[in-house]
Image: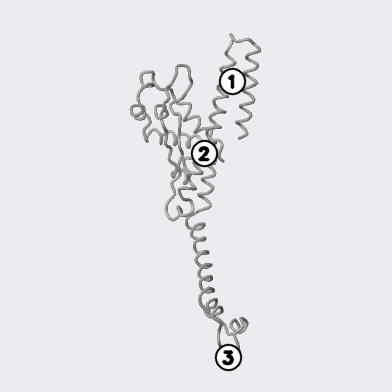
Amino acid sequence: MVWEQDDIEEDGVDDDGVVPLALAMELCLLRPIQFQYRQVSDAALSLLINDLSLIGHLTALRRFLFTDHGNFADTLCRVLYDAPPLPSHLASQPTAAASSLVSPQLSEAMLREALTLCSLDTDKYAERLTLSVLPPGSAARSQEKGGGGGLLVDAELSYRVDWPLSLVLNRECMVKYQRMWGLMMSARRAVLSLTGLWSEMMQERELPQSVVYAIHALRHEMAHFTSIL
């Protein structure tokens, strides 16, 4: 950088031309560093926003992991938890045997099915999504007769971020997104279960009317609470 004579005179140089050390440090070191800092910051911001589409990635994270696209979240929840239950002869098998039922290909197929049903399969950011699912055996659970459980008891949706975008959307940040997704999907799963419970209650004829009414009132309150989360 080139400094004008007026800049030096305004900063208090004496008549003998002796420049104080503090002033020399500011003019020769601090100001050039600050100038370069602003230049690099502007270039980095332009790279992230214009070349790496940071805003687009943030919007995609909000759409998929913050369940901003409610139709996709509901559809994925149904694909995951409305899956057929495990056969009885496999329900009590160890984790290793049960985990072979949930292959990466099956997980990918479930994710693509949900994306296709919501017309999001052509979204350029959707290809960065990866669905990992865990079978009942991995959670030390077994399918009980009449339990109504699906194939999956746990799932994790991750979003691939490449370098240098990962300097902003780092691992710690993505873990927080995944935790929020897990919370939102748990709420949607509760709504799905309560909705299914209503149809089962309507078919129940043996319970007294007062008991059915009490169960219905409780179900309604729980459904309202989970739906507004």
Nearest-to-viewer mark from 1 and 2: 2
CB under 8 Å between discs 3 and 2 = no
Q: Position of residue 171 (x, y in %)?
A: 45, 48
Amino acid at the residue labelled 2: Trp
User: Could you say which quadrant of the image residue 137 lies in?
Assistant: top left
Nearer to us of marks 3 and 1 is 3
Distance of label 1 from label 2 (alpha carbons): 26 Å
Residue named by callout 2: 181
Mark 3 or mark 2: which is in front? 3
Q: Is residue 194 above or below residue 61?
A: above
x and y percent of residue 57 in the render?
50, 49
Gap between marks 3 and 1, in whole Å? 92 Å
User: From the viewer's perspective, is 87 left or right of 55?
Assistant: left
Q: Which residue is farthest front?
A: 21
Query: In the rendering, which numbered label is found on residue 68?
Result: none
Which residue does the image show at 61% across and 31% down from the upper left? 227
Q: Earlier in the sequence, mark 1 or mark 2?
A: 2
Query: Marks 1 and 3: in contact by CB < 8 Å?
Result: no
User: Which amino acid, by three-letter code, is at mark 3?
Assistant: Asp
Tell me the residue at 57%/24% (across/down).
194
- In the rendered structure, which disc, 3 or 2, sits on the residue that comes first in sequence? 3
The residue wearing badge 1 is 198
Q: Is residue 41 above or below residue 17?
A: above
Quarter of the picture holding the C terminus: top right
Give the left or right position of residue 229, taking residue 176 as reference.
Answer: right
Give the label on residue 16, or none: 3
Image location (x, y in percent) of residue 39 = 51, 68
Q: Secondary structure at mark 3?
A: loop
Which secondary structure, mark 2?
Answer: helix
Q: CA distance from mark 3 to mark 2?
A: 69 Å
Local crowd size for mark 2, using a 10 Å CA cut-off: few (<14), some (14–19), many (≥20): many
Q: Locate residue 63, reporting x and y percent.
A: 54, 43
